[in-house]
Amino acid sequence: MRVLKFFGFVLLFFLIVALLLPLIMHDEVETTQSIEIKTSSMLVFRQVNDLNNWKKWSPFKLDDPGMTLNYKGAKLGEGAELYWTSKGSGEGSLKIVKSEPYSLIQSVLDFGNHGLATDEWTFQETENGVVVSWSLKLRELSYPFGKYFGFFVDGLFNPLQTQGLNNLKTLCEQADSEINVNREKKKARYILGVCDTLPFNARHEFLKQNEQALSNYFKSLRYKPDGDALLVLQAFVNDTYISCYGFPILDEVKESGRFNIIEIPDCEQISAEMNWSETAVDEMHQTLKLFLLENNLKVRYITEEVSTETENKVIRISYCI
C-alpha cells in the first residue's frame, strides 16, 4: 500500500511539473538555417517565389504520390497559395504574403488545428554568390502541448531546413547559366521603316519580307543608318502587335510611300542579349516576361535589335516599362 502511495505521489509530482513548465515557456519560437550558394540571388529567389518549383527541392516530399496539391491565387509571388492533403502530413496551406525581388519572401503556414507559422526567406548577395536564410517562426502556441512542441522545434525543423537548403544549393549550382537582365533608362530614338499589324510569331517573317526593300531605299537616299536594324512591337489586341521594322536615323530623312519615320519614345527598359538563335530569342522573352511578373511591371513596347558587328550575330531584346 505504501508503495502505491509513493508511486502516486511521484506521478502527481511529475504531472504538476508537466503542467507548470509550459507556463514559463515562450508563446513564440523561431528556428533559422543559412547556406551560401554560388549563383545569383535572382536564380535562387525564383525557386522559392514560384510555389510550383518547391517540388524540385523541398524537404517535405511534395512529389509524394499520396499527397494532393492545389495551387490557387497568383501564379507566383505575393498572393500565390498552395494547399495540400496527405495521409501522412495531414492538411495545410502555404500563402506568400510578401515578395520583394530579389531579397525577401514571407509566407504564412496554416496547419489547421495545429496552428499558424511564419515562413521567411532572405537573400543576401556576397562576392561568391548569395547567402540564403530560411526562418520558421511559430506563434500563439497553445497550452500545454503547443508549448512543448515549440520547445522541440529546433530538433524537428532544423534537419528539414538544412536538407531543403542543400537541395536548393545543388539545384541552383547545377542549373544552366542564367540570362542576365539589365535595367536602364533609354532616350527617345527615331527609325525610318515600315509598319504593319500582325501576330507576334509572324514578326520575323515580316522582317525578312521588308529587309531588302528597306536596305535599297536607304541606298537610293544615299543615307547611312545610325546603327543596326531593329524591330519595334507595341501590343494591340490579344497576341497581335503593331510591328515596325527599320533603321535608326539621326537626321530628318525623306519619307516615301510605306517608308516612314517612327518615334521610339524615351523610357526605362529591361533588356537581355545573347548570340542569335530561335531558342535564344524565346528564352530571353520568357526571362523578361518573368521579370515583369515578379516586379509587377507592365510593358509599353518591345524592341528586338540584331547586331552584326561581331563574328556571331547578337540579338538584344528590350522591354520598355
Image (cartoon, grey):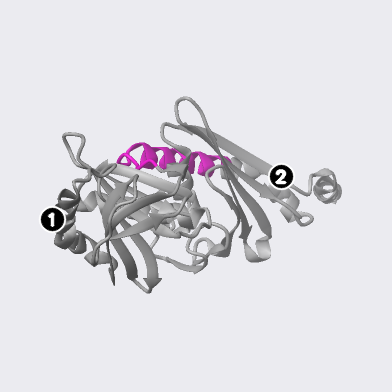
Identify the element where label 2 is drawn.
Answer: strand
What is the x, y in percent for residue 278?
20, 53
Name the secondary structure under disc 1.
helix
Q: Distance between the residues labelled 2 and 1?
A: 69 Å
In the rendered view, would you say 140 is above or below 93? above
Looking at the rendered structure, the kind of residue marked 2 is Val
List x then y, in percent, for residue 53: 42, 54
* Image point (51%, 57%), residue name: 297
- Nearer to us in this view, 15 or 282: 282
When the figure is inspected, residue 232 is found, relative to residue 133, above or below; the finding is below
Residue 29 - label: 2
Q: Give the range drawn in magenta.
A: 158-180
Indicate which label's residue lies in the foreground, 2 or 1: 1
Residue 188, labelled with which disc? none
The answer to whether residue 237 is seen in the rendering is yes
Q: Please tell me how crowded label 2 is: few (under 14), some (14-19), or many (20+) other residues with Cα within 10 Å.
A: many
Indicate the position of residue 116 as horizontal and vertical percent values. Answer: 67, 58
Q: State the mark number for residue 212.
A: 1
The answer to whether marks 2 and 1 mark residues whose Cβ atoms lie closer than 8 Å is no
Q: Does the magenta stretch include residue 257?
A: no
The chief SS type of the magenta part is: helix
In this orientation, which residue lies closer to the viewer: 188 or 33? 188
Q: Can residue 53 be seen in this view?
A: no
Along the viewing direction, whichever of 51 and 165 lies nearer the viewer: 51
Residue for point 57% across, 58% down: 78
Q: Earlier in the sequence, mark 2 or mark 1?
A: 2
Is the residue 112 above or below the residue 37 in the image? below
Q: Nearer the viewer, residue 144 or 142?
A: 142
Quick check: 69 left or right of 122? left
